[in-house]
Image (cartoon, grey):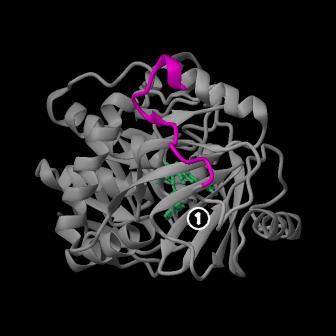
Amino acid sequence: MFYAGHSSKGWPAYFCTMHKDILIVGQGICGTFLSWYLEQAGISYLVIDQLQANTASKVAAGIINPVTGRRIVKTWMIEEVMPFAHEAYNSLGAELGITAIEQKSIVDFYATPQMKLAFEKRYQDDQQYLAVPSDENYWRHLFNYDFGYGEIDPCYLIRLQDILPAYRTHLANKDLLREELFEQEHLQVQPDGIRYKDLTASRIIFSDGIAAASNSYFQNLPFALNKGEAVWAEIDGLPATHIFKKGFNLVPWKDNIFWLGSTYLWEFDNDNPTPGFKQFAHNWLLQTVKLPFKILDHKAAVRPATLERRPFVGFHPQYPAIGLFNGMGTKGCSLGPWFARQLVQHLQTGAPLAPEADIRRFQRILTR
Ligand SMILES: Cc1cc2nc3c(=O)[nH]c(=O)nc-3n(C[C@H](O)[C@H](O)[C@H](O)COP(=O)(O)OP(=O)(O)OC[C@H]3O[C@@H](n4cnc5c(N)ncnc54)[C@H](O)[C@@H]3O)c2cc1C
């Protein structure tokens, strides 16, 4: 599309504008799957993402754990999202030529006798994702633990550290990525869509993680951002076959490197890693693992979490050209693929979004 404008010097200038069905802001796990399903649906798109080191998707461990909390209850929608995620990550991995997902089990060392009781009670009620070991001493040569352990099985480990850069290259090769900062002041809502600088699109969807909490269209939504930290430690001799949990999760990352985290902090001044966490992680390793270790790296990121722990998906009730795909909290790896496909189906066929996720549940707040 061509249109005439005027340069700052006053003479007419002709700009060439590019049109897409969807403009996506952000290539974390949400923007990745959103664009992936748009591509499969034949809906044109462009992704704008500024390279940042400490985004939630880059700092995350990548665990899909089917149970949660002290009472070890099943995670919301796990029966649907877990098999879906398995299929989604395998297909994405096949397209990118990488291993995107691995099946693991979690060795859950009970930190207290109460936790042992809670696990065993839950196991009696429902054994779908839980197992109790025949030999409680099995891990004693590698770990210090006092009250035994249970197993959570199966879990998945998502190789975000491989998926995100490989998908970025995939987008760049197809000329579908702009590596730049999206600046909201350049966004114009028009009767038939949006304009952003030299781009026009029928819709824009923000999958920009915590940035959405200060986006003027969505800042009134009940975000509950929380900060988490992790360290990466080299531990020779520890098998990469399991995720080991004792309060913190010790997660196989690559070769002899393990991810250890995390924390949940609702009040924080910045997203920097703190010396206090690093010391805590060091002590945890010293007390828990019976092998020498070396901490190699330490990062923090803020999770795009929501007050009622449900995602924010869909289009603004007053500005239907503006959409949000966000609010995955601690569960981006499992909820991201599922709701990305749901949002694309919604665009394609008008199929309804899950009411618990659809941002229209906040109609009053959003149209205030
Ligand atoms: C320590 C920690 C551990 C975690 N562990 C797990 C786990 O084991 N399992 C799990 O499922 N979840 C985990 N999470 C949560 C998970 O990380 C999030 O749910 C998920 O990554 C959110 O993805 P997202 O795509 O919405 O946001 P992000 O990953 O934050 O991606 C947003 C993208 O938008 C880009 N962006 C933002 N603003 C702009 C702009 N103005 N212009 C251009 N680009 C922009 C950013 O650069 C980024 O690439 C963890 C989180 C943390 C912090």
At x 14%, y 52%, the residue is 40
Whole-percent x and y of residue 213? 62, 44
Q: In which quarter of the image is residue 9?
A: bottom left
- Residue at numbered disc 1: 59
Q: Measured along the vertical axis of the image, is residue 323 above or below residue 160?
A: above
Quarter holding the C terminus is top right
At x 72%, y 52%, the residue is 227
The one of 179 and 298 positioned closer to us in this rendering: 298
Mark 1 element type = helix
Left/right placement of residue 32 relative to residue 94 reads: right
Disc 1: residue Cβ within 8 A of ligand 1's nearest atom: yes
Is any part of residue 260 visible from this angle? Answer: yes
Q: In which quarter of the image is residue 335?
A: top left
Mark 1 surroundings: few (<14), some (14-19) or many (≥20) residues within 10 A: many
Quarter holding the N terminus is bottom left
Is any part of residue 22 visible from this angle? Answer: no
The one of 110 and 24 positioned closer to us in this rendering: 110
Q: Which stretch appears magenta?
A: 123-137
Name the kind of residue labelled 1 in the image.
Val
Q: Measured along the vertical axis of the image, is residue 194 above or below residue 261?
A: above
Whole-percent x and y of residue 148? 67, 44
Whole-percent x and y of residue 214? 64, 47
